[in-house]
Image: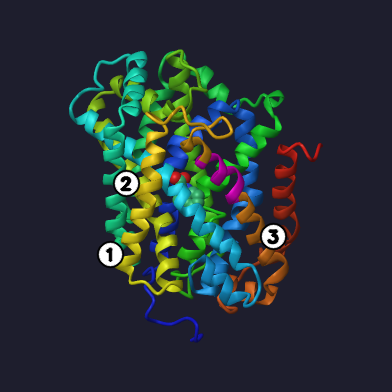
Amino acid sequence: MNESFSTDRDRFSGRFAVIAAAAGSAIGLGNIWRFPYVTGENGGGAFLIIYLFIVFAIGIPVMTSEFVIGRAGQKNPYGSFKNLAPGKPWYLIGLMGVVAAFMILAFYTTVSGWTLEYVYQTLTGNLQGKSDAELTGMFDVFLKGSFRPVLWFLIFMGFTAFIILSGVKNGIERYTKFLMPLLIVLLIALSIRSVTLEGSKAGLQFLFNPDFSKITPKVILEALGQAFFSLSIGMGTLITYGSYIQKNENLGSSALFVCVADTAVAVIAGIAIFPAVFALGGSPASGTGLVFIVLPVIFQKMPFGQLFELLFFILLAVAALTSTISVLEVIVAYLVEELKMTRRKATIAATLMVSVLGIITVLSMGSLSKFLVFGKNIFGLLEYLTSNIMLPIGGFFIVLFIGWFFSPARTKAELTNDGKLKAGYFPVFLFIVKFVAPVAIAMVFLYSLGIFKF
Ligand code: TRP
């Protein structure tokens, strides 16, 4: 056994557990809340095509590279880069990941709190019999009243911290294994109801009939940001999880599976939302509230709607939880391994810091909404900076590291488990991480800044 691969580190117990944990990280609000609203704001079908292209050309290679770095480096993102490139500045990418983790948690947990509010509102029956205008009003009033969103945020942060305290295997694994498949079944049921609503055809057309005149530099950057966000890549989440993966797991096929599953869930969420939006005569570009307003309308039109609605928002909260824990784990692993804190202390310290930023973020949707930076409130700013800028920059350097710095022999050893597996895709993978992915990320970036034109 490799010396750096000590046996006392917490590990995922096996094949299904790894995939479930990584899929649990990837599948979350990014697919069900963010994908529909960003797709809606960016014109639908053409956005979807660019998105799919980015997932396959850039997403899968970045995810695979993160797994390789984590399992070879055996630490948090900062420590893994230090291990694999001693004396070189690559660890800065890991550090940026830790900073991004704070920022993502602040707004992501805010939205996670909304899911709890909707669990509560379903239980009290308040969503029943409401028109979509009334539901829109409810959503706005909820956001503006500062107390409840802050409370739900703190409760959600508490759940996240609780699971992180119990450690990777006991905490993360146990919850992801069976709840994810259940969520997918529910989403499929919702999509069926949505496409059978009268007037829903226009929604399917919106999603699947690309109108290429809608493609602008902004649309492409949004697709890149959404792909990174949804796949949980570019921040070192999957470097951290990679470090918990056992030496006999197949990294390449795990990455492929997670990317396909994540994308499938996003598309199914799109099929659940857009047909209903058009059937109701709403606008697909109505922003962050989209699913919280549209889905309660569909539930009212389903048999046992209230029961399904309750189950749905609970499962959505769980899907969010398996994502928030994967982000908090990055900070905690960093504090434990680099600053030598106990897991307990690290979790408490990280949770307190995130909570301060998070409360400001929650309030930026309400009482602090007049406070704008670059025309965005704090929530929008954090979302934009992390998804569209920090994650792609992280991803750019991650593929550059594997493509140009790390030795291909070592990468191949990780991907084949020292020759025990076949990895026929290896030359293609290497070509993509050397050339295709970094060039594509750089082009999208420069293009969207107006520095580069096709
Ligand atoms: N991918 C998750 C989602 O779609 C969110 C998430 C978890 C994430 N870990 C991340 C996003 C790391 C960016 C980076 O809901």
| Colour scheme | rainbow
Q: How crowded is mark 2: few (under 14 residues within 10 Å), some or many (20 or more)?
A: many
Mark with earlier residue (1, 2): 1
Q: Say if disc 2 is inside 8 Å of ligand 1.
A: no
Whether 385 is drawn above or below 201: the answer is: below
Proximity of marks 1 and 2: CB atoms separated by less than 8 Å: no
Label 2 sits on a secondary structure element that is: helix
Nearer to us: label 1 or label 2: 1
Dot 2 and dot 3 residues touching (CB under 8 Å): no
Q: How many labels does the image show?
A: 3
Label 1 neighbourhood size at 10 Å, few (<14), some (14-19), many (20+)?
Answer: few
Q: Dot 3, crowdedness within 10 Å: few (<14), some or many (≥20)?
A: many
First in sequence: mark 1 vs mark 3 = 1
Going from N to C along the chain, the mark reached first, 2 or 3, is 2
Residue type at numbered disc 1? Ser
**Which region shows up in magenta?**
382-391
Which numbered circle lies on residue 166? 1
Check the image and report above or below for 216 versus 392: above
Q: Name the residue under label 3.
A: 433
Q: Does the residue labelled 1 lie within 8 Å of ligand 1?
A: no
